Image (cartoon, helix red, strand yellow):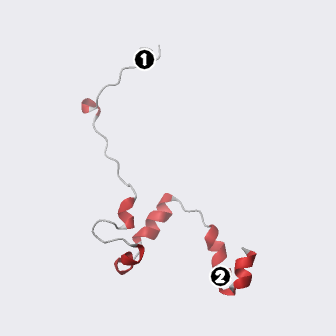
Amino acid sequence: MDTAVAMASELAPHIKRSHEDLTPLRVQELFARIPTDDLSLIWANERGGNPRNMIITHLPVSPVCIRPSVPMENGGGR
């Protein structure tokens, strides 16, 4: 890290942010801020490859009444 700052002093203010923890919510926020015009720079298109659409925010779960039942080996843990 010190070597990078020594070689390029303009990096100094950005070094502290380089150690920022990326939580799923932070990544989602960063992806949402990518302008549409910049998507081609990361080889993505607006219709199908927008990074903000690659984070699962909703997970569909079937109702209990239509899920297949799974038999237990030991009779339910008795």
Q: Which of 41 and 69 is in front in this view?
A: 41
Q: Position of residue 57 (x, y in %)?
A: 38, 55
Please give the name of the residue rendered at 62% of the width and 71% of the height, measured from the top-left corner.
18
Q: Which of 3 and 18 is in front in this view?
A: 3
Please give the name of the residue rendered at 48% of the width and 58% of the height, measured from the top-left corner.
24
Tell me which amino acid carries mark 2: Leu
Q: What element carries label 2?
A: helix
Q: Where is residue 53 in the image (x, y as percent from the top left)?
A: 35, 62
User: Badge 1, how many Cα within 10 Å: few under 14, some, many 20+?
Assistant: few
53 over 10 or under it: above or below? above
Q: Name the residue under label 2.
A: 11
Tell me which amino acid carries mark 1: Glu
70 over 62 or under it: above or below? above
Q: Position of residue 20 (x, y in %)?
A: 60, 67
The label shown at residue 37 is none
Query: Which image quadrant for residue 61?
Result: top left
User: Badge 2, how many Cα within 10 Å: few under 14, some, many 20+?
Assistant: few
The quarter in which the N terminus is drawn is: bottom right
Query: Which image quadrant for residue 50?
Result: bottom left
Residues under numbered marks 1 and 2 in contact, where contact means CB atoms less than 8 Å apart = no
Q: Is mark 1 on a helix, strand or loop?
A: loop
Q: Position of residue 55 (x, y in %)?
A: 40, 58
Q: How far apart are marks 1 and 2 (CA)?
A: 59 Å
Q: Name the residue under label 1.
A: 73
Please give the name of the residue rendered at 41% of the width and 74% of the height, measured from the top-left corner.
34
Please give the name of the residue rendered at 39% of the width and 79% of the height, measured from the top-left corner.
38
Q: Residue furthest front?
A: 43
Q: Residue furthest left?
A: 66
Q: Which of 47 and 16 is in front in this view?
A: 47
